[in-house]
């Protein structure tokens, strides 16, 4: 029982960490590298497809 609960909590933590990276850190990093805003928007929308589908 505890293993399933731990696995469940760990899964949600990892998912939240990945989503936080995409939302908070990816855009400023890519903009700092000189990538155009249109490309960043397209890339971000592609990365968010799994979260939207969930």
Image (spheres, rainbow, N blue to C red):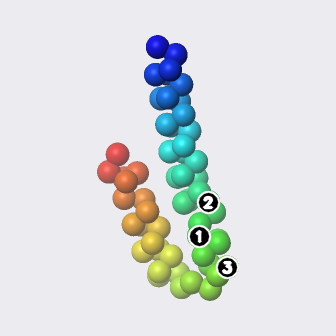
For disc 2, the marked residue is 24
Spatial separation of the CA atoms under disc 3 and disc 1: 9 Å
Q: Residues within 10 Å of mark 1 (few under 14, many from 20)?
A: some
> Which residue is pictured at 46% across the width and 13% down the height?
1
Mark 1 → mark 2, Cα distance in angstroms: 7 Å
User: Which residue is pictured at 62% across the width and 86% down the height?
Assistant: 34
Q: In terms of secondary structure, where does tag 1 sit?
A: helix
Query: Height in image: 29 above or below 12?
Result: below
Would residue 49 appear left or right of 19 to someone viewing this image? Answer: left
Determine the secondary structure under disc 3.
helix
* Residue nearest the observer in this picture, 6 or 51: 6
Asked whether the residues under the numbered discs 1 and 2 touch, taking CB atoms below 8 Å apart as contact, a structural biologist would say yes
Q: Which residue is mark 1?
A: 27
Furthest residue to the left?
53
Where residue 4 sits in the image (x, y, percent)? 46, 22
Q: CA distance from mark 3 to mark 2?
A: 14 Å
User: Which SS class for mark 2?
Assistant: helix
Residue farthest to the right, as pictured = 32
Residue shown at the point (37%, 54%) measured from the top left: 50
Q: Which of the 4 image quarters holds residue 42?
A: bottom left
Residue that mark 3 sits on: 32
Q: In the rendered picture of this protein, how many numbered marks are placed on residues? A: 3
| Category of crowding for the residue at label 2, using alpha-carbon neighbours closer than 10 angstroms: few (below 14), some (14–19), many (at least 20) | few
Marked residue nearer the N-terminal end (3 or 1): 1
Q: Is residue 18 left or right of residue 54?
A: right
């Amino acid at each position: 029982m505890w293993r399933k609960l731990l696995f469940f909590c760990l899964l949600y933590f990892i998912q939240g960490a990945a989503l936080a990276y995409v939302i908070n850190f990816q855009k400023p990093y890519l903009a700092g590298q000189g990538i155009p805003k249109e490309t960043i928007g397209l890339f971000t929308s592609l990365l968010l497809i799994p979260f939207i589908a969930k």
